[in-house]
Amino acid sequence: MTEEPDTDLDDLDPAELLEEAVAALESGDKDEAAKKYNAVGNIYMSVAEFEEAHRCFEEALTIYKALKDETGACDTMYNLGVASINLERWDEAITSLKSAMKLFDKGDNPSGSADAVYGLALASLGQGSFDEAMDHFKKAQKAYKALDNTQGIASVVMDMGAAYVDKEDWVNAKATIKKALKMYEDMDDKAGMADAQSLLGDISETNGDEKRAAELFVDAASNYYEAGIFDIAREVLDRAEQKMWDVPKATRRRLRKVIDDLRDNLPEEDELPDDDLDDDIDEDLEDMLE
């Protein structure tokens, strides 16, 4: 949504870009300044520096409003809403996302509108408004379906399942997360499959089904490994291993081989890239930033 430089975010220096943004603003090139503030905000979002991201998006929004640039303003307002979700400023997030959605609707940007209503679902859920959140989730699901955005639909369904987990509605939680898992399997999205299997494992564990929990954790660890998410693969594998003496011998023997193979193939923690060690940003929210 926000316009970003062609360079990958990892290759950009936020301090340098901030200097360029200030210089552009001082020289009167307000449009360029706003774009750079947005770019810096996205960099900070990618490394979970949400306060800094929020400040940059506010700077960009102030400039776009002064320019009466509705396209730039609604993109930035949306990003500001996502940053506010990460900061758990629920009221602020809802205000920003509602404003962004109105502008997206006005500009006939269905993709932006879908993202905004998805964000409203997450913000409403954080605020504690479960029914309102579910209404927004369903609207987002319908909007993504109209756009043929399968990834968006799967993310929404997965978050709906997680919301049911928080309410301890295990029947709806399992059914919904299984739907998300099927979608991720159809897309061969290993990270999505792993997230769904891990959450299903949590549900099984909570409900006393140690055998199924262990199996799901091992499946999740395998998919995290294939997705290159080694730190989480190791954590989920540890959880599976803790259950080895609580499952039938045949299951233990079968899972032991998979666990040992994964242990042998996982890199040592001190060999992990910095991105794997520091990556604690919520993936669904990161994906929402464009």
Image (cartoon, grey):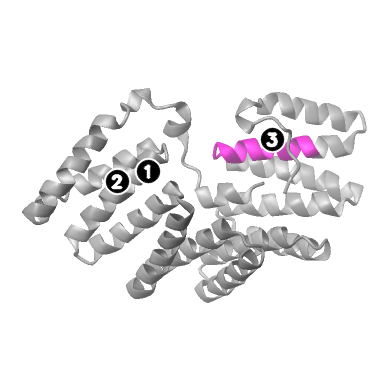
Instruction: Tell us which disc is closer to us: 1 or 2.
Output: 1
Q: Residues within 10 Å of mark 1 (few under 14, many from 20)?
A: many
Q: Is residue 161 visible?
A: yes
Reading the image, the residue beneath label 1 is: 224
- Where residue 90 sits: x, y (%)? 59, 60
Reading the image, the residue beneath label 2 is: 236
| Quarter residue 26 falls in | top right
Reading the image, the residue beneath label 3 is: 40
Q: Is residue 110 above or below residue 83?
A: below
Q: Is residue 40 magenta?
A: yes
Secondary element under disc 3, as helix, strand or loop, is: helix
Q: CA distance from mark 3 to mark 1?
A: 29 Å
Instruction: Tell us which disc is closer to us: 3 or 2.
Output: 2
Residue in the image at 86% along x and 33% along y: 25
Prevailing SS of the magenta stretch: helix
- State yes or no: discs 3 and 1 in contact (Cβ < 8 Å): no
Q: Earlier in the sequence, mark 3 or mark 1?
A: 3
- Amino acid bearing label 3: Val
Q: CA distance from mark 3 to mark 2?
A: 33 Å
